[in-house]
Structure formats: structure tokens, C-alpha cells
Amino acid sequence: MKNSPVKTIVAIGIGAALFFVLGRFVAIPSPVPNTNISTQYGLLAFMAALFGPIAGALIGLIGHALIDFSYGWGIWWSWVIASACFGCLMGLISKKLKLADGEFGSKGFIGFNVCQIICHVLAWGVVAPVLDILIYAEPANKVFVQGLVGGASNIVTTAIIGSILCAAYAGSRPKSGSLSKDN
Amino acid sequence: MKGIFNYIDRPSPIHELTGAAKLVCLLLWSFAAMSTYDTRMLIVLPVLSFMLFAVSKIRLRDVSFILTFTVVIMVLNNLLIFLFSPQHGVQIYGTKHVLFTITGRYVVTQEQLLYHLNLVLKYLSTIPIVLLFVCTTNPSEFAASLNRIGVPYSIAYAVALALRYIPDIQMQYHEISQAQQARGIEMSRKESLIKRLRAAAAILVPLILSSMDRIEVISNAMELRGFGKHKKRTWYMGRPFRAGDFAAVGLGILLLAAALVLNHLNGGRFWNPFV
């Protein structure tokens, strides 16, 4: 199924709105005090797998920038760009998943999760800390620890929420070739 | 639901400026604050932004919640940096003026304190101005101004759609969450982490699947109205530039230029008073 450009634009808008609402209001309290687990990356992985790299990048960029804006602390560019990178990479390498055709078996499940782990490691283990050092001149060991802790929790939430979303969406779509001609 | 973006409608010279001019000024301002670690420049920026606050008639009370929140984040970030790298300032400035020793490698130096002062000043030079922008710019005008500064209109329109649908999706989330809680879903600290995540999924799946239908409906409506047929479009909220707008853009350019000149004079991003 090919998405029309208009549909991609709408998907970016609605996706960014969902990303914002999940990031701002769906906070799951974690065992560590004062830290919440961000559920929005499961959504981002799912949307990127469905609508492709451009939509993934822009949903991450707009959604994350809006969250930062609404808190009013200015845009923390390094992490916003890392979100966009995650969406883009996820869109690029999860092309083979045919969610819209109703396919998400065990093969799709493993593929999706391998993809998301690679993308999270690249985004939070490399892109975010390096940009933190370049833009904000923060100490290297601090930003790498921050990036890895954030990345690890994002991998867990994406694995659970992203996979459930993909399975539910694929289940709601008619399978391609599910109709056969009666002789 | 009101108040997510805290737009406060109150007549003032800052509200009169077009969104595009404010956005350009904000971007230049934050690039200036981002690029330099010159303490003198970083003192000028907060002073200037507090003056603009006074002009805009936004009261401290209006934004006190966000301010306390960011102060907490700022303190935490500074503590983390000191914990991980107590000698970061010494590394940057190349000299070591010891003030006193806490324990082991945690030695407090003048260089480290200056580095932390710079960090705090950096927060103070960007946070008030972003708050000011958010409080004085109508969200609908924001999308129009993105297009004005050169963002393709399809992307500006995606931002407009996001801003339009955030309250709807928020309300829908609330409804689904209450319906699921009535059926016995628990998301508080009493449950284990994995169960909490599964509970979140039980709310998110209906929310996101119904949003997929919403995407379908909206894109059909837009296609029927010929969206994307022409290279340009006009905006209901767009306004022409006036003298004040040029002044705002000029101020931004001036600040960025000052930051770049200072970086050049200092021979790097850091102003070093120790040599």
C-alpha cells in the first residue's frame, strides 16, 4: 500500500500530537524517584514503521520540540535531533515490515525489535551525547551515562508498547491475499 | 483544554509583533546563547530578557509553575555534572585555583565554579525568552510564521495540525483511561513496572488505532479540498511585517553577531579570565 503525500503530512501532524500527549501526560512513575518512563518512543517506532523515514523523523522532531516548548526551558536541540534520528532510522530499516498488509508474525516481531534496539543505541548512545558535547560542552562521561540510561529505558518501553501496537494494528487490517476465489 | 501552551492574550508591544519576527529573533537569540560561554555576554542576555518581560506585561505569577520546574532541572543537571566530572572546569580553562577540598577527587576550584555559573547563566538567557515567546504568540499564528521563515508549507501545516489536535487527543486519552480504569486497570506505583507498561498499552492501543482512522478522515477531507495542489498557500493568521518586527529581527542579528565576535576575540567559545 502506498501512502499519498497528503496522508503522510496528516500522519506527521497527528503523530506529533500523539507523541506530545504521550510525552507530556502519559507518565508512568518508575522505581527511581522523579523519573518517568517515556512511552512515546513505542509510538514513534510504530509510526515510523508504518509511514516511513521522513514521517518518522518529523514526528520525532516536531513532537519533541513541542514538548520542550511547552515546558518552556528552550529546545534541548541535541535530544530533539536524537529523537528525529531515531524516527528516521527506524523508518529506513523497518521498511520490510508489512504492517498495513496485516502481517506481524514472530518474524516481524523479532525484526521490529532488532531494528528498534539498533536505532535506540545509535540515537541515545551516539547522536545525543556527541551533540551534547558539541553544542553544550558538557563532560563526556556524564552525557554518555545519561544517554545510555535513557536509551535502555526507551528500548524496554518500545519493545513492549511498540510490539503490542504493531500486533494490534496488523490484526485490525485485512491480510493481503486472504480472499480466495471459489471454484 | 486550555493552557497547554500558556498563550496569554494581553495587549502589549510584544504581542503586537508578528509571530515570524518573534520566531526569527528567538532562534537567533538561542543560537547566540548556545554558541558562547563568555560570562559577560551571558549576563547581558538574561538582563535583556527580563526587560522584555517587563514590556510584555506577562507577570512572574503567570509562569511561576514552569519556572520552579526548570529551576529544579537546572540544579539537578549541575549536581550531576559536578558528580561526574568535578575537574571539568580545570580541563577547559587549563589552570587550577583550588578553593577547598570536599573529599578525594571532589576538589572545588574557581574554574569549576565559573563553568557552573556559565551553565546557570545559559539557562537564564534562554528560558525566559522561550517562555516569553510561548506566552505572547498565538499557536495558530505559529504555524503561519514557520512557513514565513522558509519552512515548506506542508511541514508548517503538519505543525498546525499537531497543535490543533493536541487538545482533542488529550481529551480522548482521558476518556479511554477512565473507561479502562473502571474495568480495573492499575497504573500507579502499587503495580510492578511490566504490569504498568502493559496497562499503558491497554490505553494506548485504542487511542492510537482510533487516531489511525482520524488520519484517514482528515487526509481524505484535505485531498477533496485540493490540498497540496499549488506551490504556495496563504494563512488566515499571517500578518505583514511592520517597523517593530524589523527591530526584533535586527536585535536578534545584533546578539548573534556579538556572540560570534566575542568567540573570535576569545579565541574559542570560552572566555578565560584565569590567564
Image: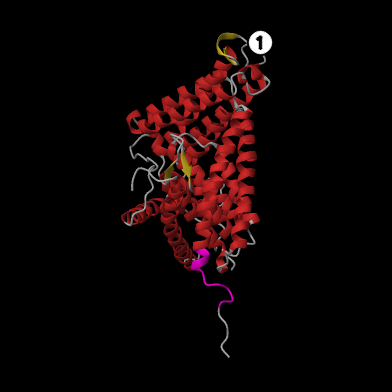
Q: Where is residue A147 shown, x and y percent of the image? A: 58, 37
Q: Residue at x 40, y 30 (%)?
A: B67
Q: Where is residue B88 shown, x and y percent of the image? A: 62, 21
The crowding category of the residue bearing disc 1, from other C-alpha atoms within 10 Å (few below 14, some 14 to 19, many at least 20), is: few
Quarter-of-image position of residue B172: bottom left
- Which residue range is magenta in the image? A169-178
Quarter-of-image position of residue A131: top right
Residue type pointed to by label 1: Val
Q: Where is residue A17 shown, x and y percent of the image? A: 45, 51
Residue B147 visible within the image: no
The residue that mark 1 highlights is: B275
Q: Main secondary structure of the magenta part?
A: loop
Q: Residue at x 36, y 33 (%)?
A: B65
- For this view, does B220 lie left or right of residue A117? left
Residue A137 part of the magenta segment: no
> How was this image coloured?
secondary structure
